[in-house]
Amino acid sequence: MSASQQRLLDLGWTPEVDRAFRPYRGAHRLARVCRVDRGGAELAGGMGAVRATFGGDVLRCVAADRMALPAVGDWAAVRDWPDDRVTLEVVLPRRTAIVRDSADRTSHGQVVAANVDVVVIVEHLDPDPDLGRIERLLVLAWGSGAQPVVVLTKPDLVPDADGMRDEVAEVAPGVEILLVSAVSGTGVDELGGLLRNGRTLALVGPSGAGKSTLTNALAGVSLMPTGAVRARDGRGRHTTTRRELVVLPGRGVLIDTPGLRAVGLVADDAAVAGAFADVEELGARCRFRDCAHVAEPGCAVLLAVEDGELDEDRLARWRKLRREADLNTARRTPGHRRAVIADLEAKRHRR
């Protein structure tokens, strides 16, 4: 195997990626997006690292929807020019994508990371984990098409880490939950086991949860800056300021992301159902197929709340997320999009 082929394998190359790139082979070369900024992107490929600006087709797609903007983890067709310029010409189809809400009313969302195999939700045990945030991040993960895993950091700072893990397990049905301490080494090998055969892991979670520290622990060297957590409120500082892809040769790929202060969702009902599998399972026993679990007779979900089988707060959070999902579904319809654009144009003309 050539050095070029090995670099692509280390980046997560698969036969599926090769098939997607086949129409562009010859005039272009294959690369993966490691970092994106306003002027272009840092790429890695068979020939090593390179910086590229965005080609005309990419810019036209981005003008129509920001979702088309190249994202960390994307595979792309890249073109070299005689004047030594390099342009990213085509973003290959995304196998999976972590998408959060965007402030742009005409957009379907913002891609946090693409072509991810495992979404690692990182949450600290000190201070206490935020169960609602974990649920929202699970919806984000299930909506991406990737496998979610929850990592609970700083277990050495609390007296009953196993008990706290059990509490988190109640809001993460069917999801693997790991206790990991980069300080003591607990769970690091178990987390590292998720990196195999060129898989891509994306770390998401709040500032101060230890995402960059985990990246350094898995790499075995200090690749990312780390910061302290404020004692008065347990909030971390943003040591990671932009998304970045890190290659661990012979193992896999990590994508470190900045801390998420708010988790804006663009998920649909299926993503919510994945994160609330326990509620969905109970709902299957309701008398009415379209039961909203509010006050309907024969509602198995409400009965489970009465019997203490389901936490009432969890049901309330499910309702809230379902409302968000319904709104997001409506926003993605062509009619809604045209109406928003028309409204923005009308406001622009009135100025």
Image: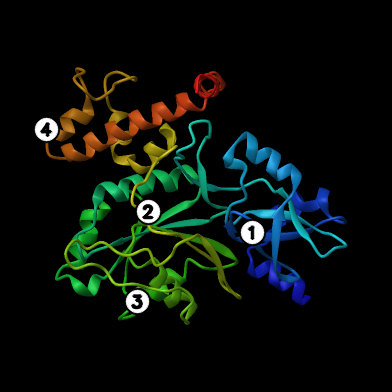
Q: For mark 1, give the secondary structure.
A: strand
Q: Nearer the viewer, mark 4 or mark 3?
A: 3
CA distance separating discs 3 and 1: 31 Å
Compare marks 4 and 2 and give the one earlier in the sequence: 2
Q: Which residue is mark 1?
A: 41
Compare marks 4 and 3 and give the one earlier in the sequence: 3
Nearer the observer, 234 or 247: 234
Q: Position of residue 212 (x, y in %)?
A: 41, 69
Compare marks 3 and 1 and give the one earlier in the sequence: 1
Residue 182 is tagged as: 3
Q: Position of residue 158 (x, y in %)?
A: 17, 70
On screen, residue 149 versus residue 88, left or right, reads left
Residue 92 in sight in this render? yes
Nearer the observer, 262 or 5: 262
Q: Contact, CB < 8 Å: mark 2 with mark 1?
A: no
Q: Contact, CB < 8 Å: mark 1 with mark 4?
A: no
CA distance separating discs 2 and 3: 21 Å
Q: Which residue is mark 4?
A: 306
Q: For mark 2, give the secondary structure.
A: loop
Residue 260 is tagged as: 2
On screen, residue 238 versus residue 47, left or right, reads left
Compare marks 2 and 1 and give the one earlier in the sequence: 1
What residue is rendered at 17% in x and 34% in y?
304
Compare marks 2 and 3 and give the one earlier in the sequence: 3
